[in-house]
Amino acid sequence: MKSIQKLSILFVALFSFNAAIAQSTMKAPVRYKLKNGVTLIVAQNVGSGKIFSRLTVENQAQENETLYAQILENYMNKRAEKFNEFLTSTTSSSKITMNYNEGNTATNVANFEDAFNFVSKSFLNQDIAKQAFDEMKDLYAGKQDDLKSVTMKDLQAYYNKNFKAEDTYITIAGDITPSQAREIAAKAFANSKEANEVITTAK
């Protein structure tokens, strides 16, 4: 598993490059631990007008689980496409991308919370496996015969094993304060199994 320090350096460097952020305006990352186990890293850049985020679930599909990962990835891709259609109707400068274990947002300040909430609820959400099973099996790009042995129970078991809050890392960088980012993240996971009223700074 990646260390928090490596994640912080990697993600802040990535966001800085994408946003053309000058080093002199980027503040040092602040780390938090949400009550449910999610790790949050925030790097503020005052006045940039943009906010970037990356949610990563540290899971790796085993060889016998690639089919489940593909079904979920198809579903995540389709969800991202639909949400981007909404963003396009409001602004041309915002976008999200999602695969089976990662979600990214690149938005202006006004669109960030909606985009972040959408991505967050697309991952740590017990209903996602069922939705993916119901809606996306027919879009699987591999051999259709492979799907005949997949059950809802299989996909849910894969989700339960691989999508855990304590294995989830979120980095937010841009025109947002650490306290604002922390509040938005707490609200995004307010309905998760573990309560999020208390937030602690990561050591």
Image (spheres, rainbow, N blue to C red):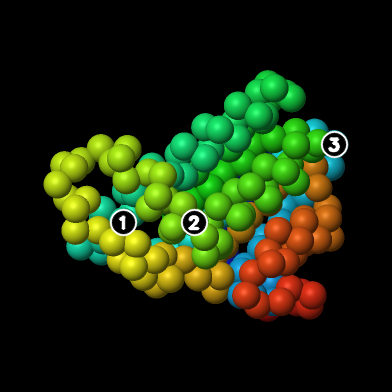
Of tags 3 and 2, which is closer to the observer? 2
Q: Going from the N terminus, do you reach mark 1 or mark 2 first?
A: 1
Of tags 1 and 2, which is closer to the observer? 2
Whether the residues at callouts 3 and 2 have beta carbons within 8 Å, the answer is no
Residue 18, visible in the rendered structure: no
Q: Residues within 10 Å of mark 3 (few under 14, many from 20)?
A: few
Position of residue 149 relative to residue 141, above or below, is: below
Residue 92, image x, y percentages: 68, 21
Residue 15, image x, y percentages: 62, 42
- What whole-number distance in Å separates the C-alpha atoms at marks 1 and 2? 12 Å
Q: Is residue 153 left or right of residue 15?
A: left
The secondary structure type at the circle numbered 1 is helix
Quadrant in the picture for residue 180: bottom right
The secondary structure type at the circle numbered 2 is helix
Q: Identity of the amino acid at label 3?
A: Gly
Q: Which residue is mark 2?
A: 128
- What whole-number distance in Å separates the C-alpha atoms at marks 1 and 3? 42 Å
Q: Going from the N terminus, do you reach mark 1 or mark 3 first?
A: 3
Residue 152, image x, y percentages: 34, 62
Of tags 1 and 3, which is closer to the observer? 1
- What whole-number distance in Å separates the C-alpha atoms at marks 3 and 2? 36 Å
Residue 129, visible in the rendered structure: yes
Q: Identity of the amino acid at label 1?
A: Tyr
Q: Identity of the amino acid at label 2?
A: Ile
Q: Which residue is mark 1?
A: 68
Q: Which residue is mark 3?
A: 47
Residue shown at 84% from the left, 42% from the top: 46
Residue shown at 28% from the left, 61% from the top: 151
Position of residue 114 relative to residue 41, above or below, is: above
Viewer-proximal residue among 11 and 199: 199
Query: The N terminus appears in which quarter of the rendering?
Result: bottom left
